Image (spheres, rainbow, N blue to C red):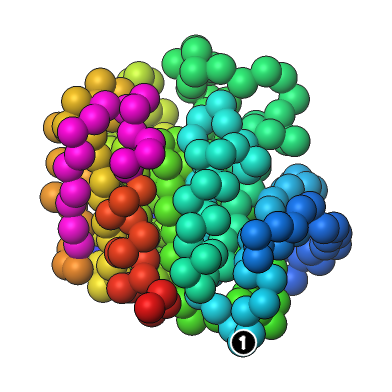
Amino acid sequence: MSDESNQLKLLRSLAFGYDRDLPFDAKTAAAGQGGGLTVERFEITSRYEERVSGLLMQSADADGPRPLILIGHPGTLDKSSDYVLWPAEQWVARGAICATIDQAGHGERARRPVSMEDFQRWPMRRLDQSLQTVVDWMRTLDYLSQRPEVDAKRVGFVGFSMGGMRGAPFVGLDERVQAASFCISAASARSDRGGSVGSLANALSDPGVYAPMMAGRAVQVVAGERDDLITPEATQRFYDQLSEPRELVWLPCGHWDFMPQGIAPVGPFLERTLGFGD
């Protein structure tokens, strides 16, 4: 391994490291029930004493450990968005457990209103939140893996837009995730910061850097043919860096009209790779 590779490995260890025995100080509360589905709100402690709020959705009458699907919401939205809850309800009905969290700077964790303009105007804040979210996902998986209803050997991740961009480092670094679907999100980032700082930022947050780290695990990329935010060219760059088993699904849509047709290929992929459904 080259000196540069060793330095990047150490850099990532610092950027995404946390105390593994840090107490969760978990708090849970019922957050809804109906149609055979139960929703539980949970809150745990992450790095830097950040409190991470999430939702756990499962069937009210299912028995035994079930596969866990972690779902990353798009930018400006949160864990309670229909963008997340609607597909989660479908996957729970097929036999999975779904969980989502408020990513750093969003939902209950937002300290100021969130807008798309923030992502362009405050790149260093975006980087800070991205690094924190990766650790938050790791902590969430640590916590949920201890729950008796969760089959920790069957863990999947689905990220929508920003949720996938922030989720790529998590999936690449955390080998407990067996399968991942990146929806309108799996594109190589292009930093607007030049010089060594920009290069280091890319090494920490660019999804394309983490694509090769997913080797041996099933990865799906679902993209819009007319996406003007996550362009087809950027999506292809990400996909080309993945190893088998992989699949790329193009849909006749853009970024903002991805739903509802966008999740059609995701459910069958998850069922096939995580082993649930009929």
| The residue stretch that appears in magenta | 246-262
Q: SS at mark 1?
A: loop
Q: Quadrant of residue 45?
A: bottom right
Asked whether, in this view, residue 125 is left or right of residue 166, the answer is right
Res. 113 visible in picture: yes
Q: Residue at x 74, y 71 (%)?
A: 21
- Please state the horizontal and vertical placement of residue 202, each as a whole percent of the image: 36, 36
Which of the image's four quarters has the N terminus?
bottom left
Choose between 151 and 86: the one closer to the eye: 86
Residue 7 is covered by the magenta coloring: no
Q: Residue furthest front?
A: 35
In the figure, 81 relative to 149: above or below?
Answer: above
Query: Residue at (36%, 66%) from the top-left corner?
Result: 270
Left or right position of 264 against 40: left
Looking at the picture, how far across and down is residue 118, in whole percent? 54, 17
Mark 1: give few (<14), some (14-19) or many (20+) Cα within 10 Å.
few
Residue 65 placement (x, y as % from top left): 59, 83
Q: Nearer the viewer, residue 167 or 86?
A: 86
Amino acid, disc 1:
Gly
Say which residue appears at 30% left-offset and 23% top-offset. Answer: 229
Circle 1 residue: 64
Left-right relation of 235 to 166: left
- Place residue 138 in its image quadrant: bottom right
- The magenta stretch spans residue 248: yes
Q: Nearer the viewer, residue 245 or 200?
A: 245
Q: Name the residue rendered at 75%, 25% in the picture.
A: 111
Residue 97 percent location from the top left of the image: 57, 67
* Figure label count: 1
